[in-house]
Image: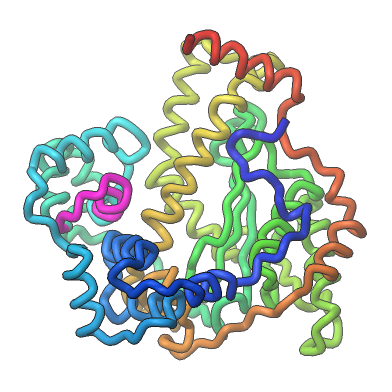
Amino acid sequence: MHCVHRKDPKWREYRDCSPGLFSKMADSRVSSWKEDNLLKGALQKYVKQGLKREEAIDFLRRDFPQYAWSIRTLDRRLRHFEVYYRDDTVSVEDVKEAVKKELEGPGKLLGYRSMHKKIRQKYDLLVTRDQVYDVMSDLDPDGLAARGGVGAKKARRKKGNFSSKGPNWVHSLDGHDKLMGFQNSTFPIAIYGCLDTASRKLLWLRVWNKNCDPQLIGCWYLEHIMETKVIPAMIRIDKGTETGTMATIHAFLRRHHTDVVDPADTILYGPSTSNQIERWWKELHERMEKFFKSQLRWLKDQGHYDPHDDIDRKLLSFIMVPVVQRELDTFKEMVWNSHRIRAQKDTVLPDGVPNHIYSFPQKYGLEECGLQVTDDQLKEAAVQSGILTVDDDFLAPEFRAECERIIDTDRG
């Protein structure tokens, strides 16, 4: 049985995922833009994310090339579909209800800017950032102050300069064990992720009951490449046993490109402290993870969970892994990848929205550095690496089936 929180590994079927498929489908439609519901949905999405009009047009020109685009045209189509950046009909009570709901979960760790992004996208409340700040000041003034209010200044250490040619030049990959507790053995909840260093866009995150299996991590890496058909020029990873299969897969695929003499040179080893995604783990810990750590600690301290009991560990992973994965995906898409990175004097990387920087690097003086790979090359890598034997689930089928049977019985 497949794990309920992960997408079925359809990449095993080696289906064609050509990025031009969407445009071809769009071109085949004969209706005008006024009847185009896909266009309406895209406009709503970009407005909720708070993209500037110039940024939204870049995505629209790419995904809807059959229509002419300009700022005036965009404004006219926004008015036609009644899509607005701000909805004055939203009541304060609606905002309070949404914020209160978030404050009862991991959203309690978000600052007002991140909360604003989540309220707009998750609850469809097109309110201003000031309105969210006012509501948070009313509902959780101490928490807001602790997270840093308007004008709050923090002492920061001087950063070193970091540069990159552009998206997919270097992917930063690392594991995160903070939820696992003492010696990474108390709670079976581990994370592994990948970040594009130029755009700072999070490309993928996986939650599992472990993140030290080299075959499993190699499988996740290849799954992502199967979806994009693009590999980065280089990867930056720890020199640990868990990265062996992933490094081998990367070098195996890079040998098909002639820009380097030795594919092994495209693998950059170093400690986690020099890995750019390490900075993001701190962001995750402050904005979401501390909530789950307190919940897990309570379960253990109250005697509801025994880390030495195999059944308890399996039950905890059955419940918590999909929950953490869902919240992680929400944080990645609704908060991080759509937030606006402000200019920093100690870096030469561009400021802007990660999604936009990654998709349109030329707007920021960068270049697309990804390298194309074919289905045949990916299939050969999958077979040669042995990852096709990796289990799709961290629980035995019989155990998962029994857990789901009990849940269905309780619901009935």
Q: Is residue 346 shown to the viewer in this render?
A: no
Q: Is residue 122 magenta?
A: yes
**367 left or right, relative to 156:** right
Residue at x 51%, y 37% (from the top left corner): 324
Magenta residues (range): 116-128
Tell me where residue 137 sits by quadrant.
Answer: top left
Could you say which is closer to the camera, residue 39 or residue 134? 39
Q: Is residue 65 above or below residue 185?
A: below
x and y percentages locating residue 217 in the rendered image:
73, 51
Residue at x 41%, y 75% (from the top left corner): 59
Total numbered labels: 0
Q: Quadrant of the N terminus?
A: top right
Name the outermost residue toward the front.
30
Question: Which colouring convention does the figure follow?
Answer: rainbow
Residue at x 43%, y 69% (from the top left corner): 354
Residue at x 74%, y 44% (from the top left corner): 212
**73 left or right, relative to 94:** right
**35 left or right, relative to 220:** left
x and y percentages locating residue 144 in the rendered image:
20, 45
Tell me where residue 123 sits by quadrant.
Answer: top left
